[in-house]
Amino acid sequence: MSADNLNNGDVIIEVKDLHKKFGDLHVLKGINETIKKGEKVSIVGPSGSGKSTFLRCLNLMEEPSGGEIYFERKLLNDKHTDINKHRQKMGMVFQHFNLFNNLTIIDNIMLAPVKIGVKNLRKERKEKVKALSKQIKALQEEKKTLLSELKNLLADAKANNTEYVENVETSDRIKVIDEKLAELIADKKAVKGNIIKNLSGDKKTVKAQAKEKALQLLERIGLSDKADKYPSTLSGGQKQRVAIVRALAMNPDVMLFDEPTSALDPEMVGEVLELIKEVADDGMTMVIVTHEMGFAKEVSTRVLFMDNGNVLEQNTPKEFFENPQNPRLKEFLAKVL
Amino acid sequence: MNFFKDMFTIFSNESYMQIFWKGLGTTLSVALGASIIGLVLGLIVAVVKIASAKNKKIKFLEILCDIYVGVIRGTPVALQLFIMAFVIFAIRGFPLEVTAIITFGINSGAYVAESLRAGIQSVDYGQTEAGRSLGLSGMQVYQSIVIPQAIKNVIPTIGNELIALLKETSIVSMVGLIDLTFAAKIVGAGDKMADYFVPMMVAAIFYLVIVYALTFVIKAIERRMRKSERR
């Protein structure tokens, strides 16, 4: 980790010299980018410019071929990084929605919070037991040394034929240790017993919380009546809105949108953009790959133009669209606007 | 009219029917035991094969699975049964029925593995991506999203495999195990019969009834699984 991003507390994603190759195809050619908390960054550019690949590298859906990606100051493309833990904080929305076809709408939203919640609870418990065992072991060691000390004193007294004087301090300490040990062992037993006995209870609690949150989210997008329906019964716009709240259910710090409206019928684009705008207004940090120039202009705090694996220009939306500098960008905007 | 008379003779003769019931029991237990082994083995092999194709460190497992599937599918099941019964499990007192269950289990495992693998790969990769993007582990995604969808996709193929397995078990008569087919042969050679045609027909009826029942169950499961696709 470099010193400069340590000083800058606002930085949430930092990309350094990012390269991505698919075989001989060099898709990303050394991208440097810093995204701060609360920013809404739109990425536009022609097809094949690498913008989707860049976005997918941010949560390692694509493994970078070179360079570094930091998320919340942690190097992501490192063997020792637990990527699953970080992905929980990076929601992603896909072009083709990718709702889980075998699960109902509510289960789609609840799956990850429940699975990960239960897993974390188990881990927490295990760690608690481990810590207690460690404490118990340390105390037992101490008791052992103290006891051998006493034994030595007794042996010395016998050998020298002097009277054995009880070391009050040591025996008091042993008494304290014994008491504490009994306490810790009881604690450990209680926690350990809980693991087996209360696991189903824990699961129920986690599930109930996740369900409550999921219902709230569904209410927010006005699809409460679809909770027990399957994704195949939803329209494209509804599917994408569910996909967005599914990502929100994990309370992410960043949301990544990969062309969220490209696969939608024109009449459904509006409802999805509306929801994304709402999420943006709530202060979410967002990176959006999009072809909707009007939307990019309205929602983003910064717009990037990518072409041929490089970021050619970036600016505030107003400057970006009204006063483009790069000839490629001028050409692109002339075509799409 | 002889046909119906003979049929009646068989169904009313207790000792004949006893042979058929015994044969039916053998056929069903071999088929059931083998299909359980086959399904579990097939699922393991399919998952291992897909996992090892992506991970170079366990490449040897993929080769192992390929050899297993290749050898089993490349040799006749009758030969496999002979090898098991007369060489590998040629132990005095080792029940032939168990030998048959193991043989057919290993055999159908290879076929199940191939259809399951195809089923798993037919699940849209976007499903996996969506799961992983939420922070679920590869294992969790497999367990909750990919495998359930894959199983739904392969129910018809697996159903066919189970029906084929049931009928293939008739080969056990070649190593002297009394199944439905062998029972028909024994009855045909019985003193009141001296005719193979009618007992074979009786055996055929038994097989048909089982296959129809199995088909019915598979269809029902399929319908249940298709619930998520209904509009």
Image (tube, coloured by chain):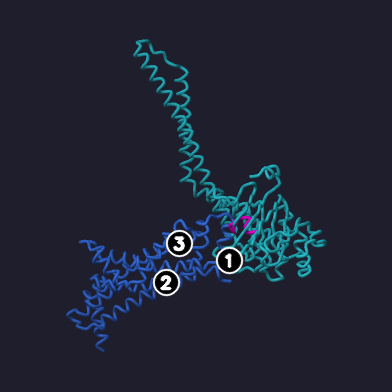
Label 2 near label 1: C-beta < 8 Å? no
The range drawn in magenta is A55-64
- Dot placed on the residue nearer the N-terminal end, 2 or 3: 3
Looking at the image, the residue that sits furthest to the top is: A162
**Which residue, given by chain and number where applicable, does mark 3 sit on?**
B47
The label number, if any, that marks residue B166 in the structure image = none
The colour applied to the residues of chain B in this rendering is: blue
> Taking the image as drawn, is residue B44 in sight?
yes
Asked if marks 3 and 1 fall on the same chain, the answer is: no
The colour applied to the residues of chain A in this rendering is: cyan
Question: Disc 1 residue type?
Answer: Tyr
Q: Quadrant of residue A260?
A: bottom right
Element under disc 3: helix
Asked if marks 1 and 2 fall on the same chain, the answer is: no
**Which residue, given by chain and number where applicable, does mark 1 sit on?**
A230
On the image, the x and y values in percent for residue B83 come to 27, 67
On the image, the x and y values in percent for residue A206 come to 56, 50
The label number, if any, that marks residue B159 in the structure image = 2
Read off the chain for label 3.
B
Asked if marks 2 and 3 fall on the same chain, the answer is: yes
